[in-house]
Image (cartoon, grey):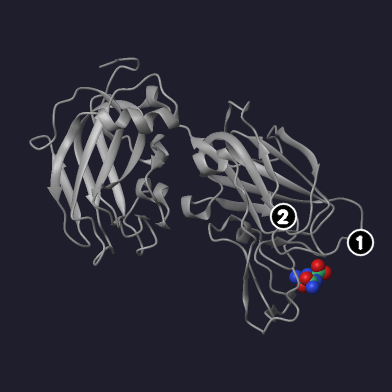
Amino acid sequence: MAVDNLPVGTIVNAAAADFPEFARRYVNLASADFGAKVLKCSDEFFASADRMLQSSEPVFIVGKFDDHGKWMDGWETRRKRVAGHDTAVVRLGMPGVIHGVDIDTSHFTGNFPPAASLDACYCAGDPDEDTVWTPIVAPISLKGNAHHFIDMAREQRTYTHLRLSIYPDGGVARLRVYGQPACDWAARDHSVSHEVSALANGGRIVAYSDAHYGTPFRVLMEGRGVNMGDGWETRRRREPGNDWCIVELGHAVTVDKIEVDTAHFKGNYPDRISLQAAHVSQATDQSLVTQAMFWPYLLEEQATGMDAQHFYEESTIKALGPVTHVKLNIIPDGGVSRLRVWGKLAAQGTQS
Ligand SMILES: NC(=O)NC(NC(N)=O)C(=O)[O-]
């Protein structure tokens, strides 16, 4: 991209990429939003390694320099003048099974690394000299200013940390590690309710009708939304019907509490919401969209208000028995900051 002739301060966005299925299906376990951190790196002279874990799209700001050189949105090491290569050790925001990665060199043109590789480990604490690293991506060639999507569908192990190696030096705008957070249900207390919709507990967005604004997976994040962008928001609906979002729960449960939080959605909260649910063992993400049309109501239509948490307890929730999936209907459209579903763990394999 020829950026030199643009006015100083112009923010240049990364070229839109054709994202593969794993990047649409799973969350980025290496996102700073989930607490992912760079624990150590061999060098970060030009740009801090933590920057490659930001969830924002990388930008190039024309004419922005700092004391070290050109300000770059990513991790960038100095030009190596000795043998060797650079590395960065990342603690994932949540332990999980990795389904694909993206080594994104957006905006690094004359300074991208010609190759990179990834190793992973599972560690209760943080890795040290005795840690045994498993190679998960052998060295691959990189291009400048480009996404490098690597499908890892065959990977089944749970990892907590990654080590990114770049050969020999250079800049990486973003490291994205798409995967399913892992949860050890056998170790959990089965006598209490669990928030099985939470990402950290294996909750996953399966499909949604529209997500013109905001990002659907954020409704399953912990804590309250920080602003209106921290949630799921649809476009204004100009035809009959309603918007919806299907969530796979981390474990089958008998639902005993639901929260729908419209934090920050004031002129655009849904007029009403409802939830449908089912216990499903045979489905694909695509077939669930069709199957969900006929699921029974877990929560009948409820009026919602702006910028508020709405809690529903057992007296309002229908007794459907164990369910594995819920469908949130927002009527007719609007924005939701958080959805939380709690319940008692059911024996896995139960079918209704
Ligand atoms: N124009 C540059 O980006 N030069 C250098 N990098 C930074 N960030 O200044 C370099 O040597 O790669």
Quadrant location of the C terminus?
top left
Residue 151 pos. (x, y %): 65, 35
Location of residue 307 (image quadrant): bottom left
Mark 2 close to ligand 1, CB under 8 Å: no
Question: Where is mark 1, residue-wise?
Answer: 81
Q: Residue furthest left?
A: 315
Q: How crowded is mark 2: few (under 14 residues within 10 Å), some or many (20 or more)?
A: many
Q: In this view, does 61 lie above or below 224?
A: below
Location of residue 220 (image quadrant): top left
Q: How crowded is mark 1: few (under 14 residues within 10 Å), some or many (20 or more)?
A: few
For the residues labelled 2 and 1, the Cα–Cα distance comes to 26 Å
Question: Where is mark 2, residue-wise?
Answer: 146
Relative to 119, 192 lies left or right = left
Amino acid beneath label 1: Arg
Say which residue appears at 53% left-offset and 57% top-offset.
Answer: 55
Q: Can residue 94 be seen from the camera position used here? A: no
Q: Is residue 152 above or below residue 48?
A: above
Relative to 189, 28 lies left or right = right
Answer whether labels 2 and 1 touch (C-beta < 8 Å): no
Residue 253 pos. (x, y %): 27, 26
Q: Can residue 256 be seen from the camera position used here? A: yes
Say which residue appears at 63% left-offset and 34% top-offset.
Answer: 121
Location of residue 41 (image quadrant): bottom right
Q: Is mark 2 on a helix, strand or loop?
A: loop
Quadrant location of the N terminus?
bottom right
Q: Nearer the viewer, residue 156 or 24?
A: 24
Say which residue appears at 41% left-offset and 34% top-offset.
Answer: 202
| Earlier-in-chain disc, 2 versus 1 | 1
Amino acid beneath label 2: Ala
Q: Which residue lies furthest to the right in this view?
A: 82
Residue 309 pos. (x, y %): 20, 54
